[in-house]
Amino acid sequence: MSTLAVTIIQTRLFWENVAANLQMLEEKINSIPEKTEIVVLPEMFSTGFSMQPEVFAETMDGESVEWMKFIAKKNNIVLTGSLIIKENDRYFNRLLWMLPNGQYGFYDKRHLFGFAGEDKHYSPGNKRLIASVKGWRINLQVCYDLRFPVWSRQRLQQNEQQEMLPEYDLLIYVANWPERRSHAWKTLLCARAIENQSYVVGVNRVGNDGTDISHSGNSMVIDPLGEVLYHNADDEDIFTITLEKEHLENVRTKFPFWQDGDLFKIEG
């Protein structure tokens, strides 16, 4: 059974300062002492959770995407996190999944945070991204998506042996989740792991943003039984953990709850 090394970067962000954030994050990534395969950055890692896409949006051949390509290749990692992207005269909170060879996939945040006016500035996505690494299937989502369990719900898929199996093995959330609602963040991350019988990684920022909203991090790694393998509040941290496919398969075999799930289809 394969393993997967994942590194979380829980950090402060320089408010709406792309150059400073890219430099800071490059230094942090270069400092990772262990061998790792995936590095996860927070939501809108180059700007913070900005509602000024007209000022800070980049294109898919812009500075931050090119930076991701450079860093992924240099460090031989998959690099993921979300950026403000402009495409076809619309703005997206777009998570990129950047491979070391420069190829990438992307996911546009589906659930826009109307409480902060995100829906007034950005367009929602309508398609999930399930990435694949070393036989692991990884569902990639952004912040507020966490509150909507149907969007992350396991769907059964047929493998080459005609067996019906869960669609993914790891669920990743990148976030700028405020400290005042940290209880919901921690509770829902555990719930997503339990109900989907999947590993869950949630990566959040720390510190105050430019609107004086405080973020306490509380980045977490949770196993498919809902057990917390890593949790850090308030501190900047770089943490690498190795996930075990054997443990995941043992849980799903011993407790095959996934077989009894409802069949459904999500309309975009």
Image: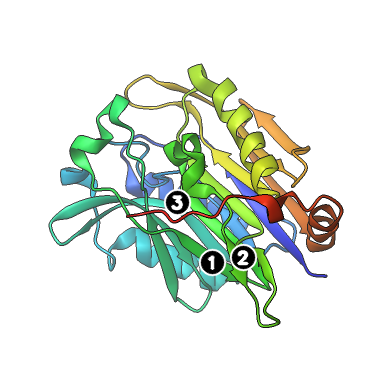
Q: Are marks 2 and 1 in contact (CB under 8 Å)?
A: yes
Q: Which one is nearer the viewer's eye here, 92 or 60? A: 92
User: Quick one: label 1, few (<14), some, or many (20+) residues within 10 Å?
Assistant: some
Reply above or below: 74 against 203: below
Neighbor class of circle 2 (other Cα within 10 Å; few <14, some 14-19, many 20+) is some
The x and y percentages for residue 144 are 43, 36
Q: Amino acid at mark 3?
A: Gln
Q: Position of residue 179 (x, y in %)?
A: 51, 21
Q: CA distance from mark 2 to mark 3?
A: 30 Å
Q: Which residue is mark 1?
A: 131
Frontmost residue, 132 versus 230: 132
Residue 198 seen in this snapshot: no
> Which SS class for mark 1?
strand
Quadrant of residue 252 within the rendered picture: bottom right
Q: Residue at x 35, y 36 (%)?
A: 49
Mark closest to the chain's N terminus, 2 or 3? 3
Which residue is found at the position 38% from the left and 47% from the top? Answer: 46
Q: Is residue 179 above or below residue 103?
A: above
Q: Residue at x 29, y 36 (%)?
A: 50
Q: Which residue is mark 2?
A: 137
Q: Tell me which amino acid carries mark 2.
A: Arg
| The furthest residue to the bottom | 160
Compare marks 2 and 1 and give the one earlier in the sequence.
1
Front one among 178 and 14: 178
Residue furthest to the left: 89
Q: Position of residue 70 (x, y in %)?
A: 46, 69
**Which amino acid lies under the numbered mark 1 shown in the image of this protein?**
Ala
Residue with the mark numbered 3: 23
